[in-house]
């Protein structure tokens, strides 16, 4: 095996170990946070339950059931708080649900239903409060709010992959350096364009 082949194998092994470690960690975090949310809810510690459920919802990993369970817990906590008449916890839970959906949006999941539930819950609670704490313009923005479009996320991902592939190719000597430089330049240009227009 050539020195470059050995170096490539070591780099691939390191990448696999890092990805496996991150995967195990995210799954463990999701499971622990759902359990902590359930425990806090059982004790009536609503703010802690919301915080733990949001952490579980944000432990996003393809195939992991814990983020969806975290989203379900947040929606349930918001609904239960509405039934109890606890507007503060309901707004906290629905706000956390909305934030978790927006912060983990991948562009390939079906998180629109959770976003709609958060928006509708916030509107119900805010419009039903005895003392209006949200100005009418904020309520109107919530009412007409939509999750961000999927295409910028997909384009950003493709640009990052192009840059990484180009940089990886430039790390090893040999033919194809011009194509690698072009991939890095186009990836950077596309990334910058999406960031400036979104």
Image (tube, rainbow, N blue to C red):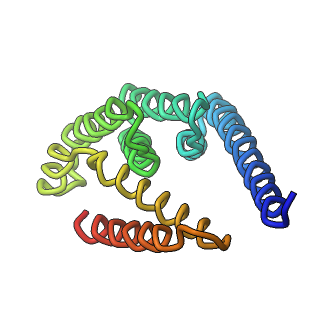
Placement of 178 over or under 115, stated as above or below = below
Q: Quadrant of residue 182?
A: bottom left
Placement of 88 over or under 180, stated as above or below = above
Counting from the top left corner in percent of width and height, residue 124 is at 24, 35
- Give the left or right position of residue 33, taking residue 195 as reference: right
Residue at the image point whose x is 16% and y is 43% from the top: 143
Q: Determine the residue located farthest toward the front in the rendered image.
A: 175
Q: Quadrant of the N terminus?
A: bottom right
- Give the left or right position of residue 17, taking residue 196 as reference: right
Q: Quadrant of residue 8?
A: bottom right
Q: Between residue 52 and residue 173, name the one nearer to us.
A: 173
Residue at the image point whose x is 34% and y is 72% from the top: 189
Q: Quadrant of residue 138?
A: bottom left
Q: How many marks?
A: 0
Q: Between residue 148 and residue 37, name the one nearer to us.
A: 148
Q: Between residue 7 and residue 190, name the one nearer to us.
A: 7
Residue at the image point whose x is 71% and y is 49% from the top: 19
Residue at the image point whose x is 33% and y is 66% from the top: 190
Counting from the top left corner in percent of width and height, residue 149 is at 26, 47
- Give the left or right position of residue 130, taking residue 69 as reference: left
Placement of 80 over or under 138, stated as above or below = above
Q: Between residue 69 and residue 46, name the one nearer to us.
A: 69
Counting from the top left corner in percent of width and height, residue 168 is at 61, 66
């Amino acid at each position: 095996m050539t020195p470059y082949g050995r170096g490539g194998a070591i780099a691939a092994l390191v990448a696999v170990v890092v990805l496996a470690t991150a995967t195990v960690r995210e799954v463990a975090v999701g499971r622990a946070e759902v359990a902590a949310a359930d425990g806090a809810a059982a004790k009536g510690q609503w703010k802690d339950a919301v915080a733990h459920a949001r952490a579980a919802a944000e432990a996003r990993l393809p195939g992991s059931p814990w983020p969806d369970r975290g989203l379900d817990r947040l929606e349930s906590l918001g609904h239960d708080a509405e039934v109890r008449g606890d507007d503060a916890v309901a707004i906290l839970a629905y706000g956390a649900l909305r934030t978790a959906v927006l912060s983990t949006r991948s562009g390939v999941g079906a998180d629109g239903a959770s976003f709609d539930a958060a928006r509708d819950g916030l509107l119900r609670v805010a419009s039903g409060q005895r003392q209006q704490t949200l100005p009418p313009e904020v309520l109107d923005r919530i009412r007409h709010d939509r999750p961000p479009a999927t295409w910028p996320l997909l384009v950003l991902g493709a640009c990052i992959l192009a840059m990484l592939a180009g940089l990886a190719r430039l790390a090893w000597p040999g033919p194809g350096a011009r194509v690698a430089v072009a991939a890095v330049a186009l990836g950077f240009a596309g990334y910058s364009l999406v960031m400036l227009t979104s």
